[in-house]
Amino acid sequence: MASSPEDPVLERYFKGHKAAITSVDFSPNGKQLATGSWDTFLMLWSFRPQARAFRYVGHKDVVTSVQFSPLGNLLASASRDRTIRLWIPDKRGKSSEFKAHTAPVRSVDFSADGQFLATASEDKSIKVWNMYRQRFLYSLYRHTHWVRCAKFSPDGRLIVSCSEDKTIKIWDTTNKQCVNNFSDFVGFANFVAFNPNGTCIASAGSDHTVKIWDIRVNKLLQHYQVHSGGVNCLSFHPSGNYLITASSDGTLKILDLLEGRLIYTLQGHTGPVFTVSFSKGGELFTSGGADAQVLLWRTNFDELNYKDISKRNLKRLHFDSPPHLLDIYPRTPHPHEGRIETVETTETTVRTLPDKGEEICRYFLNPSLMSSECSPTILKKKTEDISDLPSENQRSIPLAVTDALEHIMEQLNVLTQTVSILEQRLTLTEDKLKDCLENQQKLFNMIQQKI
């Protein structure tokens, strides 16, 4: 079958790693690509013809995650050697090492302003670091199993994390609290990410599924079962209209989120695909897998149709306005049960909304989307309900109890930071002890030789 001019095209591939590719990321200017691998190396590739690739050596075990800072002047990496490294992405590749986790680190993610770095680890914690001072800030503890991934929201107010405890948690970075909790009884998420608006999260499931959750209405919006193996990674197109997924079934799949359907299946890798990422402009994407190859693809499909689709789905785009924190926080846990509520198209979205004008106003806080049943007074009332904190006589919990709980949480936060400092000191002590034992062994060998 002949290919269409808007089909994705494989442009080139990069070979240099000696083992499986675990992570890929484009530089902000789109001129370089960073990759991490099971071979313990990072590699920095240039898209210029005949340009040399740089190999960065420093990690002592598998590199699990790599990411450029928003300015492109730093490159962060995580490793199974329990460390995080910050590299200067040039030919020398100088790096500094961070130790605070007590188990393999699974992911790194910069906030959009570049001020903070979030790291997720098999020690069941997420840690946040200050990049200007290059120091540890605080830990987030609520997961009961390995944390596989942690990502900032586009505005930096939230962090989403996924764990092998089969939960996805959303954290408020201001008060360090878990404000939302999605749970699943089938599999766990290998990877999570916010959409570009910060209104939804997508999860890549070990149970072969891709799920998209709206964090404002606390609801599973879309549920895709298009892969025949675990989904290892996903990436949103900058428009927010498309999602690309990488799976252990050896394929990449591109989903049209506005129409709720699979539009492309790409087969370029031999063996499982572990990582995929769109470029910052969306015109390119790259993938890596067990075959140790890094493939670079040209998107094409968004150039002709995504602007037209956007116009047809104007209501959907208005619905995706950035969330207010009070839309999200506080929430109660909501397990994903057998009943799946999938939004297939825009028309389906409108049909599944409540019929009453008052409830639609609560759903769409946008005057241009109001039906004739929605009076301005109702809209104003609902806006005030969401924007203002409840007064004391409206609270379901007495103010004294709330204050006591807040005080307890502050104390717990202090204890968390203390534990983290102790973790760092324990790691340093372990390193010193290891050095002492090595020196002792060397001395013993020297004495044996003399005798």
Image (cartoon, helix red, strand yellow):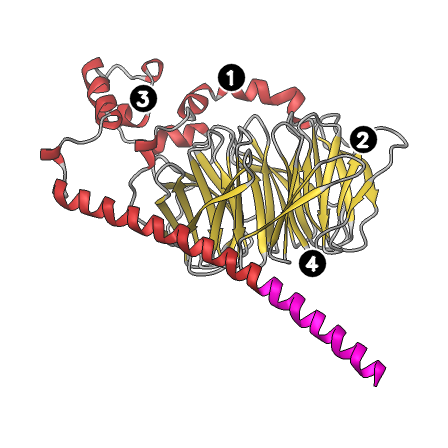
Q: Amino acid at mark 3?
A: Leu
Q: Amino acid at mark 2?
A: Phe
Task: Determine which of the numbered discs, if any, sits on residue 47 in the image.
Answer: 2
**N-terminal-most mark, 2 or 3:** 2
Kindly report which numbered mark, 3 or 1, lies closer to the viewer in this rendering: 3
Kindly report which numbered mark, 4 or 2, lies closer to the viewer in this rendering: 4
Residue span colored magenta:
430-451
Q: CA distance from mark 2 to mark 3?
A: 44 Å
**N-terminal-most mark, 4 or 2:** 2
What is the crowding at mark 2: few (fewer than 14 residues within 10 Å), some, or many (at least 20)? some
Task: Please tell me whether mark 2 sits on a helix, a strand or a loop.
Answer: loop
Q: CA distance from mark 3 to mark 4?
A: 50 Å
Kindly report which numbered mark, 3 or 4, lies closer to the viewer in this rendering: 4
**N-terminal-most mark, 4 or 1:** 4
Task: Determine which of the numbered discs, if any, sits on residue 311 in the image.
Answer: 1
Q: Is mark 2 in CB contact (under 8 Å) with mark 3?
A: no
Task: Please tell me whether mark 3 sits on a helix, a strand or a loop.
Answer: loop
The secondary structure making up most of the magenta span is helix
What residue would you read off at disc 4?
A: 61
Task: Determine which of the numbered discs, if any, sits on residue 127 in the image.
Answer: none
**N-terminal-most mark, 3 or 4:** 4
**N-terminal-most mark, 2 or 1:** 2
Q: Amino acid at mark 4?
A: Asp
Quadrant including the N terminus: top right
Q: CA distance from mark 4 to mark 2?
A: 27 Å
Residue at 56% over, 25% down? 239
Residue 116 horizontal side relative to residue 391, left or right: right
Q: CA distance from mark 3 to mark 1?
A: 19 Å
